[in-house]
Image (cartoon, grey):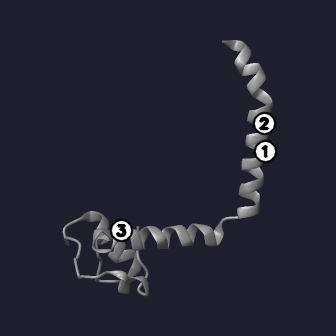
């Protein structure tokens, strides 16, 4: 997971990633940033809320609810048949 420069202010303490990790070097080359932080430096609850909000911002909740409703309906219709298999 990467942080944008704006998101880098989330960290409570500076905990740079080791410089000898290939992944960190690739991120630095790709982003042009010389600074990387380990995600562990961010409060887990805060990070979870940020991920949750980001997912909700792109999720079609109405479509998700419709799919879940269809699955529940399908399951209810199947139960009498499944019960007879035993």
The structure residue drawn at horizontal position 76% and vertical position 48%, both measured from the top left corner, is 69
| Residue 29 horizontal side relative to residue 54, left or right | left
Residue 15 in percent (x, y) is at 22, 77
- Against 6, residue 71 (above or below) is above
Please identify the quarter of the rendering in which residue 47 is found: bottom left
Mark 3 Cα within 10 Å, few/some/many (few <14, many 20+)?
A: few
Res. 38 mark: none
Please identify the quarter of the rendering in which residue 2 is found: bottom left
> Do residues under tags 2 and 1 come within 8 Å of each other at their CB atoms?
yes
| Residue 67 horizontal side relative to residue 32, left or right | right
| Residue 49 horizontal side relative to residue 58, left or right | left
Q: Secondary structure at mark 2?
A: helix
Quadrant of image for the C terminus: top right
- For marks 2 and 3, the one nearer the N-term is 3
Reading the image, the residue beneath label 1 is 70
Residue 39 in percent (x, y) is at 32, 70
The structure residue drawn at horizontal position 36% and vertical position 68%, both measured from the top left corner, is 44
Reading the image, the residue beneath label 3 is 44
Reading the image, the residue beneath label 2 is 74
The residues tagged by marks 2 and 1 sit, at their Cα atoms, a distance apart of 6 Å
The residues tagged by marks 1 and 3 sit, at their Cα atoms, a distance apart of 34 Å
Residue 73 in percent (x, y) is at 79, 40
Mark 2 Cα within 10 Å, few/some/many (few <14, many 20+)?
A: few
The structure residue drawn at horizontal position 73% and vertical position 56%, both measured from the top left corner, is 65
Marker count (numbered): 3
Residue 56 in percent (x, y) is at 61, 68
């Amino acid at each position: 997971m990467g942080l944008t420069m704006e998101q880098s202010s989330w960290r409570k303490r500076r905990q740079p990633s080791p410089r000898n990790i290939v992944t960190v070097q690739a991120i630095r080359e790709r982003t042009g940033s010389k600074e990387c932080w380990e995600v562990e430096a961010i409060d887990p609850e805060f990070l979870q809320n940020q991920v949750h909000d980001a997912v909700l911002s792109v999720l079609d909740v109405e479509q998700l609810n419709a799919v879940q409703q269809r699955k529940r309906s399908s399951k209810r219709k199947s139960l009498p048949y499944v019960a007879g298999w035993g």
